Amino acid sequence: MPKTKNKLSPKQEKYAQNVAKGMSKKDAAVEAGYSEKNASRAGYVLDSKANPLVKERIGALQEKAAKKVELDLSTHLTDLKDIREGAMRNGAWSAAVTAEVARGKAAGLYVNRSELIVNRVDSMSKEEVLQRMQQLYDDTGGILPTFKIIEGEAESE
């Protein structure tokens, strides 16, 4: 019966760290000290069910890294509040206002709305609409169908 290990070898640990950093399996194996000739196979075997400790270690390292860079709203708002208060203490009112506005945006207190008004038919005259349609027809090389002008009056509701 094969002897089970409870600990990774130094090469396995280095491989796990390299993979957790984002290296390919082959590159991680080479960097960890496995021969370049067999690096692809070594990477495949190390990251398989045959090596559960290596897989667990890679997962643990990736989870640790993810938690390290995790940003939550509470911390973000607190940091912005500290920045605002520091700016106020230094009399940097513009910076204080900027930090406070950033806090409000992060908390969802501001709604950023924009409206793009380009070639809106309801704001164009009949002649402008016809010119624009002709321009689109010409620009597309005639892909748009030809059109027939129908005269009529707008109905009021």
Image (cartoon, rainbow, N blue to C red):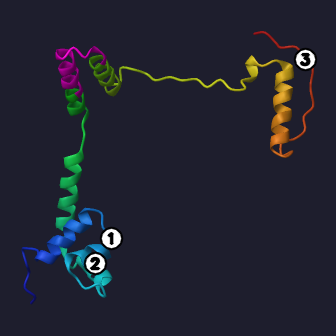
| Mark 2 lies on residue | 43
Q: Position of residue 37 (x, y in %)?
A: 31, 88
Marks 1 and 2, Cα distance to the nearest angstrom? 8 Å
102 on left or right of 33: right
Residue 62 sits in quarter: bottom left
- Label 3 with label 2: CB-CB less than 8 Å: no
Q: In this figure, which residue is indicated by the disc labeled 3?
A: 152
In the image, residue 12 lies at what x, y percent?
16, 75
Disc 3 on helix, strand or loop? loop
Q: Which residue is mark 1?
A: 24
Closer to the chain start, of discs 3 and 1, is 1
Q: How many labels, in total?
A: 3
Name the one closer to the observer, 5 or 136.
Answer: 136
For marks 3 and 2, give the CA distance: 74 Å
Residue most extreme to the top: 156
Q: Is residue 59 visible?
A: yes
Residue 119 magenta: no
- Mark 3: which amino acid? Gly
- Mark 1: few/some/many CA within 10 Å (<14, 14-19, 20+): some
- Left or right: residue 104 versus residue 146 is left
Task: Please tell me whether residue 90 belongs to the stretch shown in magenta.
Answer: yes
Task: Give the mark, 1 or 2, whose residue is nearer the N terminus.
Answer: 1
Q: Look at discs 3 and 2 and give the one toward the viewer.
A: 2
